[in-house]
Amino acid sequence: MNNYFKNLSIIIGLIATTFTACKKDEADDFNPIQNEEELITSVVLTFVDSVNIADTSTFAFRDPDGEGGNAPTVFDTINLLKGKTYFMSIAFLDESNPNDVEDITVEIKEEDDEHIVCYELLNLSSLSYSITDSDGQFPVGLEATFRTDITQVINNGSLKVTLKHQPGVKDGSCAPGDTDVEINFPTLIN
């Protein structure tokens, strides 16, 4: 009889361990890892003339298979006119599955205290910008105002766009965090 209780306690112990392990696995299924890196295949900038809002231009970078692999299918040159002010908005998309396009911009807005879009003007002396959206403390960069100088005749350069993921380290600069995507858009102002 003593062996019976000993064997029974071992079996109960094994069953309890099995249920505990199953519960842990089930809990993991309902609590996915947060902030898993998203695939960003497309960056789309929309410039709206501040005087004539019907004058809207869209410039895109699209690489449907992501970094590496095939070359981008779209890599537009940004063309802006001198002496203009533009309202700019930017969108980040995962278009790797054409039947299920995911707008990553929505997640960036929801987690605006963890993201910043940085802009760098390379050889563009006749272009300036100011970011117009914030998380309440620091800029986000999904919206900005761009101004072109009226005196410059032609200016060629590039607009570098960098999306940074900065959970817990966002300080309003582009230094901390991880780079989610970075594109140098060729830019022409005439």
Image (spheres, helix red, strand yellow):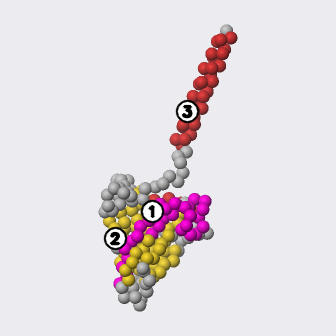
Amino acid type assigned to the residue bearing label 3 in the image: Cys
Residue at 52% x, 54% y: name it: 35
Q: Farthest bottom residue?
A: 151
Q: Is residue 92 visible?
A: yes
**CA neighbours of label 1 inside 10 A, class few (<14), some (14 to 19), many (20+):** some
Q: State yes or no: residue 49 in magenta.
A: no
Task: Quarter of the image for the C terminus: give it.
Answer: bottom left
Element under disc 2: loop
Q: For this view, does 65 lie left or right of residue 170?
A: left
Amino acid type assigned to the residue bearing label 2 in the image: Asp
Question: Which numbered dot is residue 76?
Answer: 2
**CA neighbours of label 2 inside 10 A, class few (<14), some (14 to 19), many (20+):** some
Q: How many marks?
A: 3
Q: Nearer the viewer, residue 172 or 122?
A: 122
Residue at 39% x, 85% y: name it: 82
Q: Farthest right residue?
A: 2
Question: Which numbered dot is residue 181?
Answer: 1
Q: What residue is pinned by disc 3? A: 22
Residue at 41% x, 67% y: name it: 183
Question: Where are the magenta residues, as a range?
Answer: 161-190
Amino acid type assigned to the residue bearing label 1 in the image: Val
Q: Nearer the viewer, residue 35 or 154?
A: 154
Compare marks 2 and 3 and give the one earlier in the sequence: 3
Measuring from the top left, give residue 76's x and y in whole percent. 34, 70
Question: Which numbered dot is residue 133?
Answer: none
Q: Is residue 58 visible?
A: no
Compare marks 3 and 1 and give the one earlier in the sequence: 3
Residue at 40% x, 70% y: name it: 184
Mark 2 and 3 residues: CB-CB less than 8 Å, in contact?
Answer: no
Q: Which quarter of the picture shows residue 27?
A: top right
